[in-house]
Amino acid sequence: MRREYFVFRSTRDAIKSDRILGKTDIKYSVVPVPKEISAECGMSITTATENIERIIDTLTENSISHRHITL
């Protein structure tokens, strides 16, 4: 099964993303970064494929640096 992840440079960015996305109706979860992904921050956001564009738009509008990875 394909999983969509968003990883961040810092824990602060991950927490800020969670706070901002929590005010929307987008379904997502905060999870540890999978071991297959190298990231500076240990937290990531996972979501269904249909939510990717909305999350990217929301994070970009709020100037949160992120990487989107599909596993």
Image: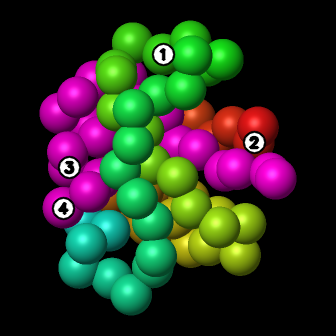
Under tag 2, what secondary structure? strand
In the picture, residue 32 is in which quadrant? top left
Q: Which residues are magenta?
A: 1-19
Q: Amino acid at mark 3?
A: Lys
Which numbered disc, 3 or 2, marks the residue that appears first in the sequence? Answer: 3
Residue 5 point in image, percent of width and height:
59, 44
- Please give left or right for residue 2 compared with residue 14 in the image: right
Seen from this angle, which residue lies furthest right?
Answer: 1
At x 66% / y 17%, what residue is drawn? 36
Q: CB atoms at circles 4 and 3 under 8 Å apart?
A: yes
* Closer-to-camera residue (57/33): 33
**Mark 1–mark 4 distance (CA, rounded to whole Å):** 20 Å
**Counting other residues with Cα less than 10 Å from the Cα at mark 2, is it few (<14), some (14-19), or many (20 or more)?**
few
Position of 1 with respect to 61 (left or right) is right
Q: Amino acid at mark 1?
A: Ala
The numbered mark, 4 or 2, whose residue comes first in the sequence reads 4
Above or below, 53 against 10 in this view is below
Give the secondary structure at mark 3: helix
| 38 within the magenta span | no
Q: Residue at x 73, y 66 (%)?
A: 49
Q: Is residue 21 above or below residue 13?
A: below
For label 4, the residue is 19
Q: Earlier in the sequence, mark 2 or mark 1?
A: 1
In the rendered image, is residue 64 in sight?
no
Residue position for label 1 = 39
Task: Give the side of residue 30 with respect to residue 5, left or right.
Answer: left
Work out how far the residue at label 4 is from the one at label 2, CA to CA, in angstroms.
Answer: 23 Å
